[in-house]
Amino acid sequence: MKKPPDSRYDGPGSTGRRRFLATGTAAMAWVAASLAGAPPGFAELMIRRHFKELSPEQLDRILRQMEQEYSTRFDTPVSVTATPPMEGVLFGYGLDLSRCVGCRRCVYACVHENNQSRSPQVHWIRVLKMHKERGIELAESDPYYDPPTVPEEDSFYMPVACQQCRRPPCTRVCPVKATWQDPDGIVVIDYDRCIGCRCCMSACPYGARHFNWSHPTISAAEVNTEMHFLGNRIRPKGVVEKCTFCIQRVRKGRYPACVEICPVGARKFGNLLDEESEMRYLMREKRVFVLKEDLNTQPKFYYFYAT
Amino acid sequence: MNRAPDNSDGTGRTDAPNGAETDQLLLPGWSSLVILLIIFGVLSTVTILAIVREGDVHVTPDVGGTQAHSPAEFPEIGFDEPLLPAVLEADGDDQPGGYNVPPPPFSNEDIFPCTWCHEEMDVNYERRELVDMHDDIQLHHGPRERWCFDCHDAENRDSLRLANGTRVSFEESYRLCGQCHGTIYRDWRQGIHGRRRGFWNGAKSYLLCAHCHNPHSPAFQPLKPLPPPVRPQFLGATNEEPEP
């Protein structure tokens, strides 16, 4: 078909595209020139490749830079690693609803371990109080309960954090591929790549993702100096964060912080591919369910009843 | 809706040939304008009221969730508690069959070994209420069916005693508990019941039953919960100056 005659396509004033390209090139040249004057490493951080495409040398350089930055900021030696996933490992988590007493030790152990902002407050774990008679009724649950002692007679408690889905809705909606699922099943976020659009937060059916509305505040005395690039390193303002199963610990073999602090031992963790692991035992022997199964997100976070 | 009819005016025409006429027909009538005005008025009143009542956050002040708390405020919880030396030394090497347990929890440091006192004493097999010594022990563990020598060995006070007469040390008290609580014992050995610390793929520390359950009164004691999260309406108030 013949194009309709239109001055926008070809006419005397058709230098628009060329002018645009010229302006764009000039602008890029200007940006490049100003980057040359920027502090060393700034350009690499700002326009670096995707985390998965970084060469080992590039990654190492970035990590050393971060260590230096954080060490200066907190006036204490900080180590930032990017420990890769282990072979033949798929992490799974179990939570015993018949044992949880709702004491919130896990919530604060998580904050202590993962360098969340103290103010404005960011909690990765949210403990929901529910009525025993009503069962799991998320709409009527209460996260703000504060009785003198727990457990309360008529209630049970359900801690909810990132469910580490096998089909995570959050990673699919990210427009810049700043969040993805690693081979060991941990859904991670690259805070440098995140643009803060919060699409992932609206996609997550568990409310597990949290936004840094302000610069995270954390004192030098409280900072956890063992950091992981995709985990508990200090976040900038305007990025999304969430539970990573304590990636800096579990990739070195340790249990997550919430598992170790739980005074009733309601929290279990292990390798789903290892038949001898605690996780496989409880999945064989106990009554197990996942949260919002109907959404087909296929979480690796299993709630169970040991009794 | 209150839109002026455009194709049911009796002419049967669906699109008017004259542009001016169509524009006029598509304009809303006076009645709909009035309704829209009313809706707008109500909405703005509600919004203004909400803004004016901003201070009222619908929460009584004594309720939790108005203030942010940091883990540093609770040093008694022991977030930085080190691992057992045995677990740290193993560093990933699993020891099948072996359980790393901290020392048994005695009510005070000077109470064990029991033979310090009991060696010189005659054994009194009579079932009685304890006075002068050990009177702090409240037996809420089947008190009618059970008493001291069902679990403590009468001849050797430094060990416990299974139902079949086997002596077990206090470090192995789980064998004693496991005689009755078989399903829990099985779960505990698998790592399902009770708290674990250490390496998910290697050495870990277990706790003895007695670390969490007082053997004489085994119901788990209620805990004081740590403070609730900040309610959204108070989050802004906790915002401090950004980092430099």
Image (cartoon, helix red, strand yellow):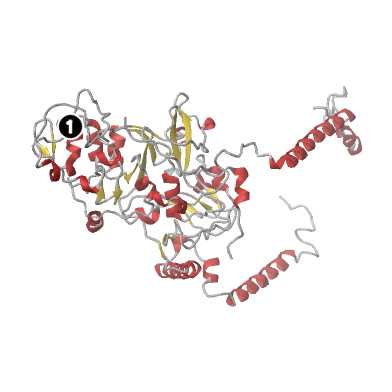
Front position in the image: A135 or B20: A135
**Total tally of numbered discs in the picture:** 1
Identify the residue shown where x is 19% and y is 34%.
Answer: B178
Instruction: Indicate whether B40 appears above or below A23.
Output: above
Image x and y of residue A176, in percent: 54, 55
Give the residue type at disc 1: Cys
Chain designation of label 1: B
Crowd band around label 1 with a 10 angstrom C-alpha radius: few (<14), some (14–19), many (20+)? some
Residue B175 drawn at (x, y percent): 17, 37
- Image quarter (top left, top right, bottom left or bottom right) of the N terminus of chain B: top right
Q: Is residue A224 above or below residue A25?
A: above
The residue at the point 18 percent across, 46 percent down is B112
Q: Residue at x 59, y 74 (%)?
A: A35
Left or right for B212, reference A63: left
Residue at 8% across, 37% down: B155
Please tell me in which quadrant of the rendered image residue A17 appears. bottom right
Q: Kindly tell me whether residue A47 is visible in this rendering.
A: no
Q: Quadrant of the C terminus of chain B?
A: bottom right
Locate residue B237 relative to residue A160 in the image: left or right.
Answer: right
Position of A95 with respect to B187 (left or right) is: right
Task: Give coordinates of residue A152: x percent, y percent.
Answer: 44, 31
Let me know if residue B72 appears in the view. yes
Residue A278 lies left or right of residue B49; in this view the side is left
Kindly state the secondary structure of the residue where label 1 is placed: helix
* Front residue of A226 and A251: A226
Q: Note whether B15 is above or below B100 in the view shown.
A: above
Give the percent coordinates (x, y) of residue B34.
87, 30
What residue is disc 1 on?
A: B148
Front-most of residues A203 and B25? A203
Q: Residue furthest front?
A: B132
